[in-house]
Image (cartoon, grey):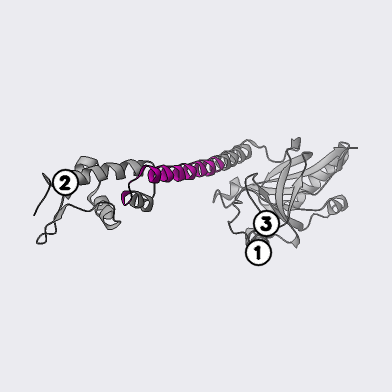
Amino acid sequence: MKTDGKLFLIGDVAKMFGLSVSSLRHYEKEGLLRPEYIDINTGYRYYGLKQFEVLNTVRYLRVLDMPLKDIREFLNNRDIDVIKEKLSLQRAEVKKRIGELKIIERKIKSRLKTIEDAQSSVPGIITVENRPGIKMAFLEKRIEVKGFTDMEEPLRMLDGKEKQTTVFLGKVGLQITKERLLKGDFNGYDGIFIILDKEESYSGEAIRLKAQDCCVVCFRGLHADSPAYYEKLVRYINENGFKIDGFSREITMVDYGLTSDETKFLTEIAVPVRKN
């Protein structure tokens, strides 16, 4: 056995570099770091100072989250232009992931606000609020909702063709048309929608709603419990000098997706209005 100096067992090398033995074996398997010597009788792996130099490079590039494939390509062709290209590509990937993480952060922030709003809501009390403009995926379809599973089929029609599934927990709503609201017909729904975040792409039919004043009420329960609250809302609208100015937006703010405690279920109805 000819070596360039002192040799170290794989376990000792792992301890020195704060790695696991399995990591060193994986680096070997991936063609990044071959032992200087392997005892054919025991299978023990020994590493020399040359491997330490390579391992330092591997560890540094792994800290930058560079894929093993790119590290291997650099180690097989050590050159300033090569590492510059690899680092530039990795920087672009990191910036992309930062953008994705910011989107996730905004989604979490939005969901937390929805939950906090639900917890602070007073069921049964009607308020008039200015709701911001929104973008929604929309499907016009007559829907009868007696249980939460009745929405699954139309939801699949809205979401099923997308390459990336639209994340819609807490953003699914049902609507009743202005015409049926004026008639006092609150049995069943005329469409289903998913509120889309600004960053979400959607290839199907989508509509944008402008900012509008809405008469809003929330109640303990799900969609099947809503007719009585529509009656209450429409009566309030008529008695307070408003006119219905669009279709209703009915969303379960707290349902099976958030809790198994049915006493905490909360649904909100918002009806766009304008002054007479």
Q: Nearer the viewer, residue 231 or 53?
A: 53
Q: Position of residue 83 (x, y in %)?
A: 38, 44
Asked if the residue at tag 1 contacts the one at tag 2, i.e. Cβ–Cβ closer than 8 Å, the answer is: no
Check if residue 102 falls in the magenta segment: yes
Q: Which mark is residue 48?
A: 2
For the residues marked 3 and 2, what is the alpha-carbon distance in whole angstroms? 57 Å
Residue 33, percent from left and from top? 25, 51
| Distance from the alpha carbon under mark 2 to that under mark 1 | 63 Å
The amino acid marked with disc number 1 is: Glu
**At label 2, which amino acid type do we have?**
Gly
Quarter the C terminus occupies: top right
Residue at 59 percent of width and 47 percent of height: 263
Dot label at residue 203: 3
Is residue 49 located in the magenta-colored stretch of the structure? no
Along the line of sight, the residue nearer the viewer: 155 or 206: 206
Residue 108, picture quadrant? top right
Instruction: Bin the neighbour count of mark 1 within 10 Å (Cα to Cα): few under 14, some 14-19, many 20 and up.
Output: few
Q: Secondary structure at mark 3?
A: loop
Q: Is residue 110 left or right of residue 30?
A: right
Residue 123 horizontal/vertical position (percent): 68, 40
Asked which quadrant contains residue 109, the reply is top right
Q: Earlier in the sequence, mark 2 or mark 1?
A: 2
Task: Provide the residue span drawn in magenta.
Answer: 75-104
